[in-house]
Image (cartoon, rainbow, N blue to C red):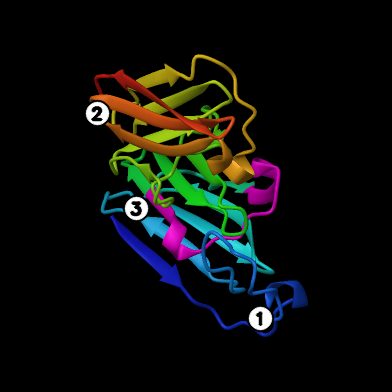
Amino acid sequence: MRVLFLLFPIGFFLVSCNSSADKSAQTFCDTTCTNDTFKFDNDHKLRPRVNITVKNCIADSITWTHDALPANRQMHMGTLLNGLIRLNNSAISCFIKDTSYAWVAFNDCLTGRGYLMQLPFDKTQSVRKMSSAINSFDKKFVLPDDMRAYADYSTIYVEDINTGKKEQMTFKEEYKIDFNNIHEVIDSVNLNRSRIYVQLIKAGEKISLEKQISL
């Protein structure tokens, strides 16, 4: 799969996005303002592709299509994810499975929050979105390139992006997780095809949970 990161001339930046921002605040990735477009495709003969446009420094719209579709599929990013997202090419990836679907993974550079979207090219199928993703852009989260993971307050879910096969592990109790500050509760995650390992934090103590799986 080829990933293209295209640059376009920019006439001006909004004050809230330019270098006058507070550089002393720690962010997940580079938040320098850019209106660049992210483009992803693969070598399939129908040229399936995903484009994410950026407007005023913020992810604006996502479009996915291939040459056999009569019309593109498109959604507004802020509406889809219920918030404004700052992207950087260091924390975004896209896997496109022929003309079936695309998996887009990224972390918001401002909060570090992880997101996943599964985008079917068939308009009769619904978009899946996860705003509590466990993405490997975060150095404390380790998982293979062909697996995706996300969590809720009591469970971590794992999925094979090629087959759709799923596994999960419960935390044995519910945790109050702020996914904008995920490491306050989920310290680290290590996943492979045979094991889910999660280290949680409760009352300042680390709790390790492990489950054998088969993906």
91 falls in the magenta region: yes
Which quadrant is the N terminus positioned in?
bottom left
* Place of residue 100 in the rendered image (x, y in percent of width and height, measured from the top left): 37, 35
Q: Is residue 96 magenta?
A: no
Residue that badge 1 annotates: 19
Q: Could you tell me which residue is drawn at 40 percent across and 53 percent down?
A: 93
Residue 119 shows in the view: no
Image side of residue 85 versus residue 70, left or right: right
In this rendering, does residue 156 appear at all? yes
Question: What residue did someone put label 2 on?
Answer: 193
The three-letter amino acid code for the residue at tag 3 is Arg
- The correct choice, above or below, for 128 with respect to 4 in the image is above
**Mark 2 or 1, nearer chain start:** 1
Image location (x, y in percent) of residue 113: 57, 47
The range drawn in magenta is: 76-94
Q: Quadrant of the C terminus?
A: top left
Circle 2/circle 1 CB separation < 8 Å: no
Q: Which residue is mark 3?
A: 47
- Residue nearest the observer in this picture, 43 or 167: 167
